[in-house]
Amino acid sequence: MRNTFAKVVWCLVPTTLLACAGDAPPAKQTSSTILYMDKPAASWYEATPIGNGRLGGMVYGGVTRDTIRTNDDTFWSGEPRDLQRPGTYKVLPEIRKLLLEEKNQEAQKVIDANLLGPWNQNYMPLADILLEWPGDGNVSGYRRELDLNRGVVTITYAQNGINYKRELFASYPDQAIVMNISADKKNAIEFTAGLGSQIESGVKVEDDQVVIDGQAPYHTDPNYTGVHPPVYKEGKGMRFEGRLLVKQEGGSVTPSGDKLHVKEATSATLAFVAATSFNGFDKDPYTNGKDEKAICRKYLTSLEAKKYSDLYKAHVADYASLFGRVSIDLGESAEAALPINRRIADYKPGMDPALTALYFQFGRYLLISASRPGSQPANLQGIWNQDMQPAWSANWTINCNAEINYWPAEITNLSECHAPMFDMIRETSVDGAKTAKNLYNSRGWMAHHNLDIWRTTWMVGGTGLYSLFQVGGAWLCQHIWEHYLFTLDEDFLKDHYDLLKNASLFYLDNLQTDRDGYLVTSPSESFENGFVKPDGETGWACIGSAQDMQIIRALFENTMKAADILNDGAFKEDVSKAYAKLAPMKISPRTGQLQEWNDDWEPSNPASGQVGHGWAFAVGNQITLRGTPELAQAFRKTIDYRRPGYSYNSGSWTGTFSVVYWARFEEPDSVQRVIDRHFDLALSPNLTCEFMKSWQIDGNLGITTAITEMLLQSHAGEISLLPALPAKYPAGSVTGLRARGGYEVDIFWKDGKLTKAVIKADRTKKDEVIPVRYGGIVKAVKLAKGETVILDGSLE
C-alpha cells in the first residue's frame, strides 16, 4: 500500500512544543475548554474519552505501554428476541380489582408472578489498541491534554533529550480513531502496535494492518445478578472486525508475530476502523447481519487516499461546527493551571468558578462524541464501556437516565445530536405496539423501564417496583415535542406525529377510572418508590401515580397541539375528551406537599432522592413558578422535606433532578450547593460522573443542563435571563444558547447584573412577540424571522 499520510512538522516554542497539523487555524484555548493530566492513566476512570458518535475510545496515554479501549455503539450481546406473551392482559382485571380494594401487596404479588420478563442484554467492550514503547518510562514534562475546541487529545513528553508527541481524535467524517506520532528528532520513533479484546477473537497481521475479528456472546447476564461468564454459541451472536492501519515516515514497519513493529521513523500515523454485523434491531446479526469486513475495507479505502493533515482538518471542521456554537465564561480560576484530577480532588465551594464552565463544555463534548446522526443514542455510559457486565447493562433506562442524556441537546445548540434518540423511539414503537396489545389489550404503542439494542419493550425481570414503568414511551415522546419547540420544524413534526398519536392512543384505551371518576394508570408505580399508608402498610403497586399522570397529561397536550398544526382535528377531539378526565395533581391537606400518589401516602424512604412527581416542574411545564404558584410551592415543600440533592453522592439523576428543581425555583444558592456537592463527591479523576462506582453519563449531561438553566430558561412561555445565577460567578458571558420558539441567545453580565442580551430570531415562522424576563422586569419583544434585538440590563 502506498504511504500517503503526511508527517507532522514541529514548531518549537520556548518550553512548549506544538504540532502544526495542516493549515487549520489554532482554536482559542481557555480554562473552559482545556483539561489535562500530568501522568498516564492508571485506570479507565483516569483515561480520556474520545468518540465520533459510533466509535469510542478511552485513551490511557502510557509511555511504555499504552492502551486505547474502544467501543462500537452497535456491539451488544444477544440477538432479536420475541418476548411477547399474547393474552397476558387477561390478568389485569384481577390486579386492578385488588388495587381498587386497596389490597396493594396482593396486587404486587400478582404483578411479579405474571407480568415480568427476562433481563436486557449487555453493551460489550470491543477491542483494545495496544502500543508498546521502548525505554523504562523515565520521562519528563508529561502532559495528556484534551482540547474541547478541537476534540483532540495531545500527549507530549521528553525522553532521552527527545520531545515526543501523540495527537488523537475520533473522526466522524472518516469514521476512524486516528493517532499521529511525531518527534523533534529524525528517526527517533519506535513502537509496537497490536490489538486485543475481552471478546473471543483472533488477531493477525495483513501487510501494514493489524486485524482482529470475533463474535459477541449469545447471552450475558446483568451485573446485578452476580458474576456470570458470557455464553457463546456457534452461529449465534454479533460479529465484529477491527483494523489498525500503521503508516510511517522514514524507518520501517515490519510484522512481529500478531503485531507491527515501527522502527527509526520520523513520524507515524495510526488509523483504527471497526464494524459489526449489526443490521438493525429486528435482524439476526449472524445469519442476516451486515458484512463487517466489507465495511472495514470501505473505511480503509477512503483513509488510504488521504494525508494526515486532511484527516485532521476534516475532523476539526466537522467537530468545531457543533462545539463552536456556544461559548461560556464564568470567570477565571488559578486552579485552571492544575491537572484535572488535582482540580477535582482539591475542589472547595467558592473556589474554581472556571471548573463549572469547563464541566458545561465537557458535557457538550461528551454528547457530540456519543451521539451523531446515524449512531445509536447515548446509553448509560455514552458509548464507552470496559466491562463484560457493565453497570445496569449500559442500556437505555427510560424512567429518566436516557432522557436526561438529551436534555442539553436543544438548549446547548446541539440539535443534530438529538437525532439518534428519535430513531430509537421509532424502532421502539414496533415492539411497543405488540406489548400494548399483548400486555394491555390496547392499541397504539408503549414502553416500560429498560431498552437494549434489540428494542424489546416487555417488562424486565426482578420486580414491578421498577419494571412496571408504564410511561417510558410517553416520556420519550416529550423529546419529539421539545425538538419541535426549539426548531419549529414542521416537516420533522409531520414525520414523527404518528409516534405521538399512537402513544396517546395507547392511553386512550388503557386508562382506567378511579373511585372519584378520574382516568388513571392501573397498575402503576412511582419512580421506584415505595409508600407507607396511614395504617402502616407498605408497598409500591398503586393507581395513578402523580408522575404517570403528569407525563400522560404532557403527552396529550403535545399531541393536541401537534394535531392543530397538522390539521388532525378528529383525533384532537378524542384526546381532549380523555384529557378533561385525567386525575389532577393534588396537594396534601395534611402536609401541604404535592402528593406523589393518588392517595395521601408517605414515602417509605423519604431520603431516596427519587422525587418523581417533580417531572411536571423539571421536565414539563405543568408546574411553573409563576404560572401555577400554589402547585409550585407545594412541590417546594416536598423537596424541602425529601432533600433529593443529598441522596447518594449527587451523581447521575440524584444531582440532576435536584439542581434543575432549584434552577427553576430561581434559587441560585441552592443551585450552587448541589453543583458543589456533585463536584466534591461525584467526579472521577477524568471529569466523568461516578454513581455507585460506575460512570453514569446522565450525571455529566444533566448538570450541563442545570448550568444552562441557571443562565437561561424558556419553558414557561418566556425567555428568562439569568434566572438563577449564583454569586460565585459575578461576571461572565454565554453565547449561542437556544430558547424555545426558534431563538438564539447571548447573555453578558457584570457584578452579578445583566449588562446585555442578544436575541436572534433565526428560526421563528413569522413576526412573534416573546416576553423577555430579567428578575422582576418583563418586556414584550417583537421579532421577525432573521431579526436580532440587543437589550441592556433594563431590557431596553
Image (cartoon, rainbow, N blue to C red):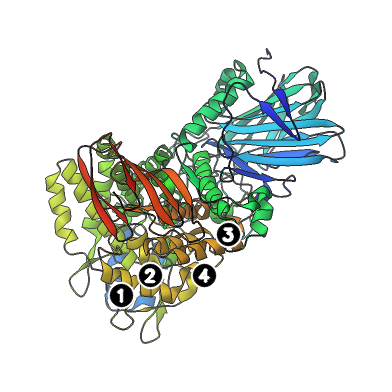
Residue 307 coordinates in the image, percent (x, y): 62, 18
Q: Nearer the viewer, mark 2 or mark 3?
A: 3
Residue occupied by mark 1: 98
The residues bearing labels 1 and 4 have C-alpha atoms spaced at a distance of 36 Å
Residue plotted at (46% across, 56% down): 751
Residue in view at x 64 percent, y 37 percent: 153
Asked if residue 702 can be seen in this view, the reply is yes
Q: Nearer the viewer, mark 3 or mark 1?
A: 3
Q: Amino acid at mark 3?
A: Phe
Residue beneath label 3, please?
Answer: 679
* Image side of residue 377 versus residue 187, left or right: left
Query: Few, some or many C-alpha atoms within 10 Å of disc 3 (few <14, some 14-19, many ≥20)?
Result: many
- Kind of residue at disc 4: Tyr
Q: Where does label 4 land, which residue?
A: 646
**Residue placed under numbered mark 2 in the picture:** 110
3D distance between C-alphas at marks 2 and 1? 10 Å
Check whether the beta carbons of the residues at disc 2 and disc 1 lie within 8 A of each other.
Answer: yes
Q: Three-letter amino acid code at disc 2?
A: Val
Q: Secondary structure at mark 4?
A: helix
Circle 3: element type:
helix
Q: CA distance from mark 3 to mark 1?
A: 46 Å
Quadrant position of the N terminus in the picture: top right
Residue 283 versus residue 392 in the image, above or below: above
Residue 123 vertical position relative to residue 775 in the rendered view, above or below: above
